[in-house]
């Protein structure tokens, strides 16, 4: 019996060492990659011989790798404006050319963008996406996205060279591609082949601007039990949701847990001046998430600061919320203003407190602010109130089906300004100092 016990013990010990060895070997294969728009060449991706663009090395990345990107402007592989990565990696921007120091909102801005006109490689996918929805590997390293500036201005199509209004459709005769309707920075992580571990995701010190999605400009979705931190980001001048807090889990408990703190989310537009159903909200939440949301600025939206139409579990504490056209908070179909949130919002955690609407000044350029004030924001419900319903067979059928009847075409003034181009300098100036010394992002926190 003793001999048998010793054999079993030795076998277990050997298996233990083998398992540790497997983990160590896996970790040992994780690689640091380096990218420089100014000095890069080839696909070696070393510090001495960096690659020229992140998009040029995506197929070589493995789970657990880290990509370090120097300051410069990156247009994607073939200048297509989009980089999609399908394994869990970390991406760190804002380095100098020697990769020894970082200043992502200052001297070494790492800007991800693209080209619109006469671009045969144009794609509509997100500017940067870590897409793990088909990843089934067992290795689940922590994911960090830190110090990137995603600016879609040069990916958008504008009506004129003054860049005052985006155009959603293409114009092939002029070589103009449509304005992309996908987000700027997206991390989407679902279940994997590892049933014991969960995702740990951080997005910080990033700027997402001039994007025109139907959903999130900055979007993070995770799976059961995951821990996600979204902190110290500037999300400014986008359509859809400024931030989208998402879930790939459909269970009844152990939702992915989000900490959303010290972000500045400003100027979130509707899809266009007329459409009422597209979000135009600073932040939105999937139902199967739980979030602690604190010390953020959610301001200047066409619809809602906090869009909780799906009644997610949110703790909302010490946020600055103001300048929202429809309401400060939406819960399912109930619009609630800031003063009544703690009393009337049923999905908010009982510890929610001290959300304020104190007056602030947003330091954008006078020209940008003047143009913003010139836009036409249409209240569709009010505009349609006196329109005569068409008497058509189509409406007879719609009536039978219980659908809204179609009215005459709504004649409205076209807005001369819609998502006009915001400069990177304006965005950083507006988001790099905490408002009232407490709310929103501040200078990128580099460790």
Image (spheres, rainbow, N blue to C red):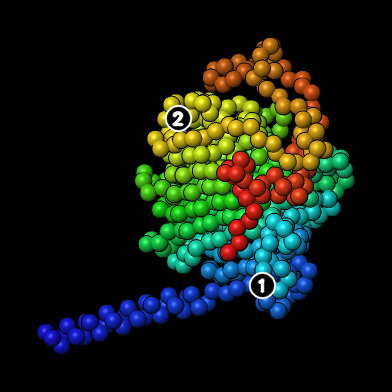
Res. 342 mark: 2
The quarter in which the C terminus is drawn is: bottom right
| Quadrant assignment, res 227 | bottom left
Q: Find disc 1 in the rendering and name its residue.
A: 100
Q: Position of residue 286 (x, y in %)?
A: 49, 41
Q: Secondary structure at mark 1?
A: loop
Q: Which mark is residue 366?
A: none
User: Camera-side residue: 106 or 165?
Assistant: 106
Asked whether the viewer can see residue 293, the reply is yes
Identify which residue, 237 or 157, lies in the foreground. 237
Q: Is residue 17 above or below residue 331?
A: below
Residue drawn where x is 36% and y is 46% of the image: 253
Check if mark 2's residue and mark 1's residue have beta carbons within 8 Å: no
Q: In screen coordinates, is 256 left or right of 328? A: left
For the point 53% across and 68% down, which residue is it?
63
Outermost residue, front direction?
A: 437
């Amino acid at each position: 019996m003793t001999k048998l016990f010793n054999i079993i013990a030795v076998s277990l010990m050997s298996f233990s060492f083998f398992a540790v060895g497997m983990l160590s070997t896996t970790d040992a294969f994780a690689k640091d990659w380096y990218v420089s728009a100014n000095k890069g060449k080839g696909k070696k991706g070393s510090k001495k011989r960096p690659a020229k663009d992140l998009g040029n090395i995506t197929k070589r990345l493995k789970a657990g790798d880290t990509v370090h990107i120097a300051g410069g402007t990156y247009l994607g592989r073939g200048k297509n404006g989009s980089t999609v990565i399908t394994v869990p990696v970390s991406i760190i921007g804002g380095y100098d050319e020697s990769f020894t120091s970082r200043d992502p909102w200052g001297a070494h801005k790492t800007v991800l963008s693209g080209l619109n006109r006469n671009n045969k490689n144009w794609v509509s996918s997100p500017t940067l996406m870590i897409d793990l929805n088909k990843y089934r590997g067992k290795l689940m390293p922590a994911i960090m996205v830190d110090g990137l500036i995603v600016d879609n201005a040069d990916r958008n199509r504008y009506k004129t060279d003054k860049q005052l209004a985006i155009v959603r459709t293409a114009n092939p005769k002029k070589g103009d591609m449509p304005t992309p309707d996908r987000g700027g920075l997206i991390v989407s992580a679902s279940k994997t082949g590892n049933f014991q571990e969960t995702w740990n995701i951080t997005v910080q010190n990033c700027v997402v601007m001039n994007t025109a999605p139907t959903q999130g400009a900055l979007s993070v979705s995770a799976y059961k039990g995951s821990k996600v931190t979204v902190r110290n980001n500037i999300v400014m001048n986008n359509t859809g949701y400024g931030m989208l807090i998402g879930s790939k889990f459909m269970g009844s408990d152990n939702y992915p847990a989000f900490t959303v703190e010290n972000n500045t989310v400003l100027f979130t537009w509707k899809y266009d001046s007329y459409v009422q159903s597209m979000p135009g909200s600073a932040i939105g939440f999937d139902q199967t998430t739980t979030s602690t949301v604190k010390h953020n600025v959610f301001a200047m939206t066409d619809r809602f600061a906090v869009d909780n139409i799906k009644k997610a579990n949110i703790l909302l504490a010490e946020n600055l919320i103001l300048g929202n056209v429809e309401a400060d908070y939406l819960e399912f179909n109930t619009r609630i203003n800031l003063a009544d949130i703690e009393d009337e919002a049923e999905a908010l955690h009982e510890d929610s407190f001290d959300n304020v609407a104190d007056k602030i000044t947003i330091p954008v350029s006078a020209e940008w602010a003047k143009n913003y004030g010139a836009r036409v924001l249409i209240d569709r419900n009010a505009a349609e109130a006196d329109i005569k319903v068409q008497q058509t067979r189509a409406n007879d059928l719609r009536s039978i089906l219980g659908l809204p009847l179609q009215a005459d075409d709504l004649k409205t003034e076209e807005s001369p300004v819609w998502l006009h181009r915001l400069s990177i300098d304006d965005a950083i100036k507006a988001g790099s100092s905490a408002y009232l010394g407490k709310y929103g992002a501040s200078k990128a926190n580099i460790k």
